[in-house]
Image (spheres, rainbow, N blue to C red):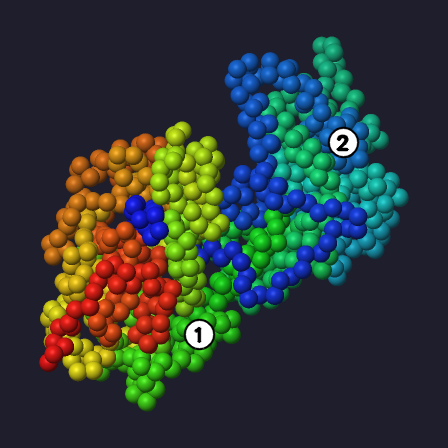
């Protein structure tokens, strides 16, 4: 249950931070290695490309995830956020009325910016709190009555459709839903025929919520204008990503929201009503904002579109909307359109290559929205799994688009929607994540059906033991030749005996069995015990290490986790990002590929749930995350058994000795023999390998899982994996609230402990010490202690590991003393031990060899006889 400690003084070898036991972590793949890149279509001739890096840097939310939900609520810029919060602060100092008066000129400019965006005049614009409010006020002003015909496209949004259905039932209007043509767009021929009879309104959504379709708005507007019928354009999903010109499109009414592609705050919206229609469209419920009570029984409405506004509104949100509008105008909607639609096309093209994925966009899809389905899976599960690995998407049910999704027989679709802060890397990462997940599902299908999945390209086998590719022969000099290969261990004899069923021993046993070796796997305790170092809910994974010598092994570890996920058919790692903090100018600061040093202010922006005071700096590792430790051990055990591993829990090893050309292992249950012995015994390594007894030490570690009344502050993305090197205290590490468990914290050091004595419960003093640190650095961790955990670290000098052949005994290998930060390397070190057992050299691990720890050759027990 060890964490991932790294507080060593060895600047060239120590790990420099901690990782704890008890949460979950997904692969978080951010590149589509091995996949042919889909080219990004260039911008229109003569048009510059967007500076996406600058836009991402100015968008705080992009530090936490691949955000692809602009059609739901796009990420606002830091400037938009500041406009809102600055005005709220001003209201707190001056008062609401006074603050509005002080910034009246800025508020007035919002109308001008909105008008510029759609080719209108400022007096044609009303600011409202949502597109639905704009729709309802516009229709209310039309005073529709029984018999009035409303022609609506099948792209109509749910709230608009519900309003029309209610007006049909309560007012007697005649509602006609226009058919779609083969491309998915409104059938213009059918519309032209429908307009031969009198109609009160034509309405269409420029882009529906349920797909990337773009309606032919200019053609619809021209047909409606020719018939003398006003057209209401729902620009909710288009304004900000597609050009909208009310004159060119012949719009009488436009409704839009601020929170989608305009990147404004939630609770904002726009209503345009043209002057010709406004002359006869009086608000059904006039408000003091839009009308003057001129005499006891008389009032006059405002001459412009503000007649549809209400007095009560958020001036702070309106100023935020103004900032967002100005940013869109400064970038230019044509440039935004080029970028967004190019990324969407890249995604559609990439999805076509992912087995098991079906695109659900109609042929006329040409916006920044992309919809798809995974075969035999509820889209909500698809999106949940993607969110757990750092992707922000959503789903759209048929109940939000019955005239579209319902007509096409789709119950629900997954929806990705892209914006200016997205890049080709985001798109490729999503495609890679879907591809990797399909491979894992392919492995799961083999497990249930016994038939290999064509979507899996891994050379490892699935949990049924059915290999998706031929098992490689053991190398010459390895544990078994092809001639002697057999299906499993035979009683008291095997090719390899592995001692220890923690993450390293279990990984080694599985890897050896996959390669064809017969394996007996021993552990001194019953399955599921809590006496060692691999139990608990979660561990940390990170790239941030103090020295470059670790970088290669870290990269190998990330790849090994992806391979294990594919073989297991489940997600084991979740990317949350990580912050590793210490006092400014403290030696031993971490670094690593893709990592950056930030001050305490920036750290608070990245992880609002973690409180660092002035004087602290931190290293931000965006690829850090959480490993589901329990699921990992369960998966490794199942994979091992599926490949013939003879797992024997509750079987303690009493000793071992050389036995001719092999090894004899004495256990409580009898004598076993093998060609090779792999020792991954954690705290009991010194008992089995006496050469390690002096350099290794075993210490007690405690963890707490804490509840919160503000749990969201302790969950990703507001908190990720972290550590804080607290002066005069030690290294506090933590894993965010995840998988139903509260935030987990611990210290990476503790008193010496005798592993032969059962670990005692967490004491009151240990508990109080951690609670004091939690109140200092995690103010939201104000809930009860949900769980206490004890574990043992087996510490080595300089916090290094010992991985390799035992000096003087090439038939015995070990992975020992992983010093609190070794769990993340489990699958990688398991593969390394299998390589070494096969006679292969691993020069990349020389810096972790037992000899590098100072272990020298000694006569092997029984070598003389």
Dividing the picture into quarters, in which one does residue 757 lie? bottom left
Give residue 389's position: percent from left, percent from top.
47, 53
In the rendered structure, the answer to whether residue 589 lies left or right of residue 265 reads: left
Does residue 631 sit above or below 592 in this rendering? below
Depth order, front residue of 613/696: 696
> Relative to residue 70, is residue 832 drawn left or right?
left
**Residue at x 25%, y 74% (from the top left corner):** 810
> Where does label 2 land, which residue?
115
Quadrant (top left, top right, bottom left, bottom right) of the C terminus: bottom left
Q: Residues within 10 Å of mark 2 (few under 14, many from 20)?
A: many
Tell how many labels: 2
* Disc 1: CA contacts within 10 A as few (<14), some (14-19) or many (>=20): some
Identity of the residue drawn at 41% across and 53% down: 548
Q: Is residue 861 left or right of residue 294?
A: left
* Mark 1 element type: loop
- The label on residue 459 is 1
Of marks 1 and 2, which one's residue comes earlier in the chain?
Answer: 2
**Image: 261 above or below 487:** above
Query: From this viewpoint, which residue is outermost toward the top?
Result: 295
Report the side of 846 relative to 702 (left or right): right
Q: Distance between the residues labelled 1 and 2?
A: 60 Å
Residue 283 location in percent, x, y?
72, 27
Under circle 2, the secondary element is helix
Q: Where is residue 690 in the image (x, y as percent from the top left)?
A: 15, 63
From the viewer's side, name the closer residue of 767 and 425.
425
The residue lying at 47 percent from left, 51 percent from top is 593
Task: Choose between 163 and 464: the one closer to the eye.
Answer: 464
Of all residues shown, which one is farthest toward the right? 226
Query: Which label sits in the foreground, 1 or 2?
Result: 1
Q: Residue 600 sits in which quadrant?
A: top left
Location of residue 478 by image quarter: bottom left
Q: Are marks 1 and 2 in contact (CB under 8 Å)?
A: no
């Amino acid at each position: 249950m060890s964490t991932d400690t790294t507080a060593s003084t060895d600047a060239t070898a120590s790990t420099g931070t901690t990782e704890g036991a008890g949460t979950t972590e997904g692969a978080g793949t951010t590149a589509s290695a091995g996949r042919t890149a889909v080219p990004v279509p260039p911008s229109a001739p003569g048009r510059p490309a967007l500076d996406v890096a600058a836009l991402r840097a100015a968008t705080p939310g992009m530090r936490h995830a691949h955000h692809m939900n602009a059609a739901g609520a796009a990420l606002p810029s830091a400037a938009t956020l500041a406009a809102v919060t600055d005005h709220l602060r001003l209201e707190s100092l001056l008062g609401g009325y006074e603050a509005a008066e002080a910034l009246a000129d800025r508020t007035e400019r919002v109308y001008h910016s909105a008008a510029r965006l759609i080719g209108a005049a400022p007096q044609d614009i009303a600011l409202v709190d949502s597109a639905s409010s704009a729709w309802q006020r516009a229709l209310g002003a039309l005073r529709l009555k029984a018999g009035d015909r409303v022609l609506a496209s099948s792209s109509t949004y749910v709230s608009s459709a519900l309003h029309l259905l209610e007006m049909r039932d309560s007012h007697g209007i005649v509602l006609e839903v226009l058919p779609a043509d083969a491309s998915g767009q409104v059938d213009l021929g059918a519309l032209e025929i429908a307009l031969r009879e009198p109609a009160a309104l034509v309405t269409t959504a420029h882009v529906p919520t349920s797909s990337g379709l773009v309606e032919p708005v200019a053609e619809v507007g021209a047909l409606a204008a020719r018939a003398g019928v006003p057209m209401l354009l729902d620009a909710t999903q288009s304004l900000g990503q597609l050009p909208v010109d009310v004159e060119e499109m012949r719009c009488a009414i436009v409704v839009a929201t601020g929170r989608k592609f305009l990147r404004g705050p939630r609770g904002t919206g726009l209503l345009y009503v043209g002057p010709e229609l406004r002359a006869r469209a009086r608000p059904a419920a006039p408000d003091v904002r839009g009308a003057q009570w001129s005499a006891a029984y008389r009032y006059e409405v405002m001459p412009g579109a503000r007649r549809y506004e209400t007095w009560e509104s958020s001036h702070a949100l309106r100023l935020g909307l103004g900032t967002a509008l100005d940013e869109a105008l400064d970038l230019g909607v044509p440039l935004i359109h080029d970028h967004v639609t190019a990324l969407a096309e890249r995604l559609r093209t990439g999805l076509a290559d992912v087995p098991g994925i079906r695109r659900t966009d109609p042929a006329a899809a040409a916006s920044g929205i992309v919809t798809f389905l995974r075969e035999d899976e509820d889209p909500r599960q698809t999106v949940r799994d993607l969110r757990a690995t750092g992707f922000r998407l959503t789903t759209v049910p048929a109940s939000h688009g019955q005239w579209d999704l319902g007509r096409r027989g789709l119950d629900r679709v997954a929806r990705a929607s892209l914006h200016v802060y997205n890049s080709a890397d985001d798109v490729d990462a999503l495609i890679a994540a879907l591809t990797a997940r399909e491979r894992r599902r392919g492995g799961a299908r083999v497990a249930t059906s016994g038939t290999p999945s064509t979507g899996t390209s891994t050379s490892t086998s699935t949990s049924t033991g059915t290999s998706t590719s031929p098992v490689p022969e053991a190398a010459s000099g390895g544990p078994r030749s092809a001639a002697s290969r057999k299906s499993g261990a035979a009683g008291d004899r095997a090719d390899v005996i592995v001692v220890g069923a923690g993450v390293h021993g279990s990984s080694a046993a599985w890897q050896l069995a996959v390669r064809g070796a017969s394996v007996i796997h021993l552990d001194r305790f019953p399955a599921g015990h809590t006496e060692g170092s691999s139990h608990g809910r979660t561990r940390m994974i990170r790239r941030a290490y103090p020295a470059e010598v670790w970088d290669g092994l870290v990269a190998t570890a990330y790849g090994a986790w992806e391979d294990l996920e594919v073989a297991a058919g489940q997600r084991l790692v979740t990317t949350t990002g990580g912050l590793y903090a210490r006092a400014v100018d403290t030696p031993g600061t971490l670094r690593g590929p893709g990592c950056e040093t930030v001050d305490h202010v920036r750290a608070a922006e990245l992880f609002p749930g973690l409180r660092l005071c002035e004087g602290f700096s931190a290293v931000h590792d965006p690829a850090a995350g959480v490993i589901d430790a329990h699921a990992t051990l369960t998966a490794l055990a199942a994979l091992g058994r599926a490949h013939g591993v003879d797992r024997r829990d509750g079987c303690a090893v009493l000793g071992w000795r050389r036995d001719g050309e092999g090894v004899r292992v004495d256990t409580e249950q009898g004598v076993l023999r093998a060609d090779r012995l792999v020792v991954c015994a954690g705290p009991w390594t010194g008992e089995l390998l006496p050469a390690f007894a002096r350099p290794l030490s075993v210490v007690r570690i405690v963890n707490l899982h804490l509840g919160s009344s503000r749990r969201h502050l302790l969950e990703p993305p507001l908190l990720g994996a972290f550590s804080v090197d607290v002066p005069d205290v030690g290294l506090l590490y933590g894993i965010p609230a995840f998988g139903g468990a509260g935030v987990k914290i611990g210290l990476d050091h503790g008193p010496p402990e005798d592993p032969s004595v059962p670990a005692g419960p967490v004491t009151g003093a240990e508990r109080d010490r951690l609670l004091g640190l939690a109140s200092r650095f995690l103010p939201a961790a104000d809930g009860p202690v949900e769980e206490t955990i004890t574990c043992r670290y087996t510490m080595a000098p300089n916090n290094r590991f010992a991985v390799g052949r035992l000096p003087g005994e090439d038939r015995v290998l070990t992975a020992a003393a992983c010093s609190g930060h070794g769990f993340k390397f489990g699958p990688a070190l398991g593969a390394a031990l299998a390589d070494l057992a096969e006679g292969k050299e691993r020069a990349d691990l020389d810096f972790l060899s037992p000899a590098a720890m100072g272990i020298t050759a000694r006569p092997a027990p029984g070598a003389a006889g």
